């Protein structure tokens, strides 16, 4: 399948693995890229330019296909060394960067100057247009269904994607709620040039996380995610667990007075305990509603091959069949 996204990034299939904290290590990115998609290393999980440079080098040892690095801009009292991280990306010869959080205006000239393609992930048409206007090459349009930060507009992809198609000139991929061939074909029908998946890629053989995380995704239905930190305007869609239910109780109690300190225990520094140690009640971890569509743990190659062959069958048989009949 050839789309503007496969051509732009030099990949075989229009499938991207979104940056994921404590999941997007070199093993994950290389597995997705080796399977013909675009794997992405999560820059902030490495944290320092030295560690990121090392992770990029490790990924290059595992694949000769293109892969990307995610740079997430978060409000922080101790911001990471973004210029240093950008330098590590450029010197590492990375060709694609996925930005997220704030708009990437400050780093864009450096990345573009080095010939790097930038795909900005955002959750609204207005932010997509902003990304286009500052010179991003593509957008990842993240609907309300998504795992992680869906923003504050709550527009699901059934509306958001055609809205983006109506307004954008640069290509975009659909993100949030994408799991299989049906997701891909629907996304293409609504104007996207491919899809970005987060949660689905955690439940793969190569995802470098504790098996408890994969089993939790398999066991979850589409009813098992919660929105936390809404009062802080930092909404995150997470898998429910004891810590999350406690967090929601605190939010209810504090109301508009909620501060980050009130929920520190449930959100700060919990990712390594969950993803590496498999302590599933340690705190809040991002997960999409799409968990309800995930029921196996294939290799990335099996997953991507299945998506592409079933997508072809849907297009050639089911959809064309409606017309031929
Ligand atoms: C465990 C987890 C961690 C994530 N961490 C990040 C992150 O650090 N930066 C980022 O831009 N997006 C992050 N995301 C969002 C994904 O890149 C992707 O946009 C999202 O998962 C898409 O929705 P889906 O889960 O329904 O596929 C994370 C998602 C998950 C599930």
Image (cartoon, rainbow, N blue to C red):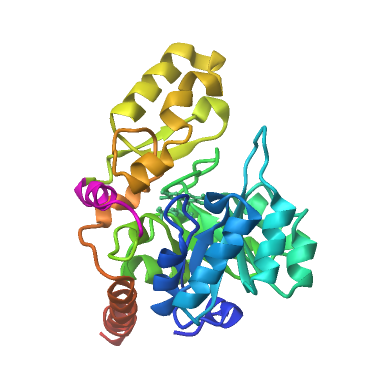
The stretch of residues the image draws in magenta is 208-219
Where residue 103 appears, as percent x and y from the top left, is: 69, 51
Q: Residue at x 31, y 44 (%)?
A: 277
Q: Residue at x 39, y 35 (%)?
A: 284
Vertical comparison of 70 with 145: above or below: below
Q: Residue at x 51, y 64 (%)?
A: 40
Magenta span has 218? yes
Magenta segment's dominant SS is helix
60 displayed left or right of 241: right
Q: Nearer the viewer, residue 227 or 32?
A: 32
Vertical comparison of 178 with 232: above or below: below
Q: Nearer the viewer, residue 162 or 121?
A: 121
Q: Quadrant of the N terminus?
A: bottom left
Q: Quadrant of residue 303?
A: bottom left
Q: Nearer the viewer, residue 183 or 98?
A: 98
Q: Residue at x 48, y 25 (%)?
A: 264
Vertical comparison of 79 with 264: above or below: below
Is residue 192 something that shows in the picture? no
Where residue 161 appears, as percent x and y from the top left, is: 51, 59
Q: Quadrant of residue 282?
A: top left
């Amino acid at each position: 399948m050839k789309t503007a996204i496969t051509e732009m990034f030099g990949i075989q299939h229009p499938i991207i693995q979104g940056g994921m904290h404590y999941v997007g290590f070199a093993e994950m990115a290389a597995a997705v890229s080796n399977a013909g998609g675009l794997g992405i290393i999560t820059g902030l999980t490495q944290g320092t330019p030295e560690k990121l440079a090392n992770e990029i080098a490790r990924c290059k040892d595992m694949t000769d296909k293109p892969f990307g690095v995610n740079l997430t801009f978060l409000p922080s009292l101790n911001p990471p060394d973004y210029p240093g991280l950008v330098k590590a990306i450029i010197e590492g010869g990375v060709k694609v960067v996925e930005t997220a959080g704030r708009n990437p205006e400050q780093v864009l000239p450096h990345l573009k100057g080095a010939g790097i393609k930038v795909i900005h992930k955002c959750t609204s048409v207005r932010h997509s247009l902003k990304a286009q206007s500052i010179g991003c090459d593509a957008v990842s349009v993240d609907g309300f269904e998504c795992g992680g930060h869906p923003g504050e507009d709550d527009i699901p992809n059934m509306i958001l994607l055609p809205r983006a198609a109506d307004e954008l000139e640069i290509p975009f991929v659909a993100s949030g709620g994408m799991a299989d061939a049906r997701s891909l074909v629907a996304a293409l029908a609504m104007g996207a040039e491919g899809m970005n998946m987060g949660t689905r890629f955690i439940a793969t053989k190569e995802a470098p996380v504790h098996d408890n995380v994969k089993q939790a995704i398999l066991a979850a239905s589409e009813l098992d995610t919660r929105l936390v930190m809404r009062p802080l305007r930092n909404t995150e869609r997470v898998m429910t667990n004891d810590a999350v239910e406690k967090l929601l109780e605190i939010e209810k109690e504090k109301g508009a007075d909620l501060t980050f300190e009130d929920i520190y225990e449930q959100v700060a520094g919990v990712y390594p305990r969950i993803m590496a140690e498999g302590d599933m009640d340690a705190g809040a971890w991002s997960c999409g509603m799409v968990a309800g569509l995930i029921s196996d743990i294939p290799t990335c190659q099996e997953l991507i091959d299945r998506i592409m062959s079933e997508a072809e069958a849907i297009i050639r048989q089911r959809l064309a069949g409606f017309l031929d009949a």
